Image (cartoon, rainbow, N blue to C red):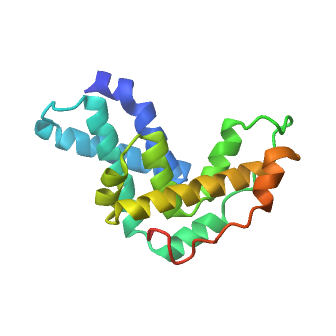
């Protein structure tokens, strides 16, 4: 199990971190995912690679925690996010800027974006996991991408970023997958 942990621990942490948007919570949930993997190792059928299995398990652990969290907790956590300053070369979108923008997305948008664009899930898989329709997943992904472009574009000077920041974006309030 030690070699499996060494091979997959970083990616497990990364996917959980992207979903929850908090370093400390991601550490706790990653550890919880590994404990569950150890407890459920006898259920691993080998139909998929171990990495696929553990990433899915970690994703489910993170999503379950987010589901249990109240919306009030999410609002309070979002209010505490630090402001990230633009990198010296504003034309380059750094990992730090992307992470900060991802962290500022509403939880429903962030989940769909991470599951689809980062983890490669289909809209049907996302819909089944988040208990919504595939159409809702597609809509949330579109809105999440637009919001990311807007946040990243506001960090650049002129060009497409300025145009993106001028585009009137609907707030999505009431349409977001519940946290």
In the rendered image, the vertical position of residue 85 relative to residue 136, given as above or below: above
Q: Position of residue 168 (x, y in %)?
A: 73, 67
Q: Quadrant of residue 68?
A: bottom left
Residue 40 horizontal side relative to residue 121, left or right: left
Residue under the point 49% across and 62% down: 139
**Looking at the image, how many numbered discs can be counted on the residues?**
0
Residue under the point 73% across and 38% down: 93
Q: Position of residue 172 (x, y in %)?
A: 57, 71
* Residue in front for this viewpoint, 112 or 77: 112
Q: Quadrant of the N terminus?
A: top left
Residue 74 horizontal side relative to residue 154, left or right: left
Q: Position of residue 176 (x, y in %)?
A: 49, 69
Answer whether residue 156 is visible to the viewer in this image.
no
Residue under the point 42% across and 49% down: 28
Answer whether residue 145 is visible to the viewer in this image.
yes
Q: Position of residue 6 (x, y in %)?
A: 37, 25
Residue under the point 79% across and 48% down: 161
In the rendered image, the vertical position of residue 92 relative to residue 4, given as above or below: below
Residue 55 horizontal side relative to residue 175, left or right: left
Residue 53 horizontal side relative to residue 158, left or right: left
Q: Quadrant of the C terminus?
A: bottom left
Q: Quadrant of residue 39?
A: top left
């Amino acid at each position: 199990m030690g070699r499996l942990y060494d091979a997959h621990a970083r990616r497990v942490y990364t996917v959980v971190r992207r979903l929850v948007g908090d370093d400390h919570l991601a550490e706790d949930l990653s550890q919880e995912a590994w404990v569950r993997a150890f407890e459920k190792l006898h259920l691993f059928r080998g139909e998929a690679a171990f990495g696929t299995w553990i990433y899915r398990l970690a994703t489910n652990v993170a999503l379950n925690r987010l589901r249990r969290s109240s919306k009030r907790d999410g609002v309070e956590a979002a209010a505490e996010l630090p402001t990230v300053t633009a990198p010296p070369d504003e034309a380059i979108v750094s990992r730090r800027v992307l992470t900060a923008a991802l962290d500022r997305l509403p939880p429903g948008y962030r989940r769909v974006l991470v599951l689809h664009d980062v983890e490669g899930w289909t809209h049907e898989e996302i819909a089944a996991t988040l208990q919504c329709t595939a159409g809702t997943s597609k809509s949330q992904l579109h809105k999440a991408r637009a919001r990311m472009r807007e946040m990243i574009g506001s960090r650049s000077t002129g060009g497409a970023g300025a145009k993106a920041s001028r585009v009137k974006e609907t707030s999505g309030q009431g349409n977001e997958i519940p946290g």
